[in-house]
Amino acid sequence: EVQLVASGGGLVQPGGSLTLSCAANNFGFGYFAIYWVRQHPGQGFEWVCDINNEGTKTDCADSVKGRFTISRNNAQKTAYLKLNGLKTEDAGMYYCALDKSGSTRGQGTQVTVSS
């Protein structure tokens, strides 16, 4: 069974930074692309960024491009999402998943952006 656990969320002021981590259990982590998605209260899932299985190709939504960076360490079975220049509209629950829709997401982590 695939298990993904996101962590690293918290409360940060506008303009601040956070680094989220996505830890995987013992499935073939290195064979899968990883997607970060987020959910604002009362809304559906929004794709944020993704990275291919080798970590050589990344893409992010226009709303976060230039502010968020995705990376991964296959040896540690962990993916990361570095959030810089946070805005209030970035607040929400963040999940990592094996698909862009977030249907394979695991446990999420809450990001709160407030002064």
Image (spheres, rainbow, N blue to C red):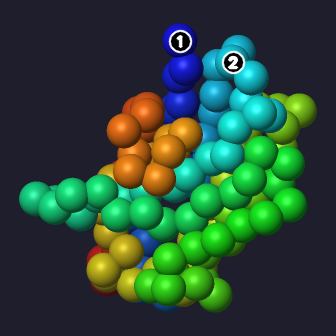
Q: Residue at x 23, y 63 (%)?
A: 40
Give the residue number, with chain letter if any, for mark 1: 1
Dot 1 alpha-carbon crowd within 10 angstroms: few under 14, some 14 to 19, many 20 or more: few
Percent x, y for residue 113? Answer: 35, 74
Residue 27 in view: yes
Near-viewer residue (57 or 10) = 57
Residue 16 in view: no
Percent x, y for residue 86? Answer: 47, 81
Mark 1 and 2 residues: CB-CB less than 8 Å, in contact? yes
Q: Residue at x 55, y 40 (%)?
A: 98
Percent x, y for residue 4? Answer: 54, 30
Give the structural element (helix, strand or loop) at label 1.
Answer: loop
Percent x, y for residue 10? Answer: 43, 57
Residue 29 falls in image quadrant: top right
Callout count:
2
Q: Which mark is residue 27?
A: 2
Labels 1 and 2: the sequence-earlier one = 1
Dot 2 alpha-carbon crowd within 10 angstroms: few under 14, some 14 to 19, many 20 or more: few
Q: Amino acid type of disc 2?
A: Phe
Give the structural element (helix, strand or loop) at label 2.
Answer: loop
